[in-house]
Image: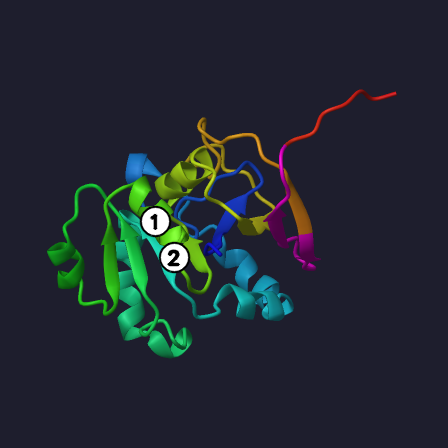
Amino acid sequence: MSRRIILQEFITLDGIMQAPGGSKEDEAEGFRYGGWTAPFAEIGFKEGEEFMKRWMESTDILLGQKTFEIFAGYWPKHEDAWPGIIDVTKYVASTTMSQSDVDASGWDNSVLLNNVEDIKKLKETDGEVIKVHGSGNLAQSLFKHDLVDEMFLMTFPITLGTGKRLFGEGVIPAAFKLTDNLITSNGVIFAYYKRNGDVKTGEME
């Protein structure tokens, strides 16, 4: 039985997922809206507490290089806020890093994956689910190669019009089933989707 890959993302109504947590998180291409989740966090995260517990559940994670570097610089010093994050395996997908680079990050239990084939091999091993946080380029590659089993999306009621998007040109047609959801009083939508076969079409009467 293969391991499930769960994509967990903060996104805007127009699909932007860049730098949700802070102004300096990712300023690539002059992005100036970093930290766009912050005004919604106090109410949204409180009302969505049970969903957030599931979001932060300790399990192996898979990250792109940029997100790995951000996480490696932060979570080893704040592990009390994410119990178990030090113990799980952290996989980083990168074509430019070496395992020695990964080891130099100081984040224990971190393993380099060089390409999509490495991810496919990992998925076919026995073990717990693997969660992907952020990692826009990686997420688009996973969609392109049909490696996303579930999505846990937290959608915020804003549009930005610019920035890195979750769904790119390479996304394959696929159907998903909504299995759980919550809408907070300030408009944050927690939605959990599981892969549900192929896209079906028909005619509207």
Q: Which residues are magenta?
A: 179-198
**Residue under label 2:** 125
Q: Amino acid at mark 1?
A: Lys
Distance of mark 1 from mark 2, alpha carbons? 7 Å
Q: Tell me the quarter of the picture where residue 195 sits.
A: top right
For the residues labelled 1 and 2, say whether their Cβ atoms are less than 8 Å apart. yes
Mark 2: few, some, or many residues within 10 Å (few <14, many ≥20)?
A: few
Q: Main secondary structure of the magenta part?
A: strand
Instruction: Please determine whether, in this image, residue 137 is positioned above or below residue 81.
Output: above
Q: Amino acid at mark 2?
A: Thr
Residue 72 is covered by the magenta coloring: no
Q: Nearer the viewer, residue 92 or 28?
A: 92
Residue 107, horizontal then vertical, whole percent = 23, 67
Q: Tell me the quarter of the picture where residue 30 sits.
A: top left
**Residue under label 1:** 121
Residue 67, horizontal then vertical, whole percent = 32, 52
Residue 24 is at least partly visible in this image: no
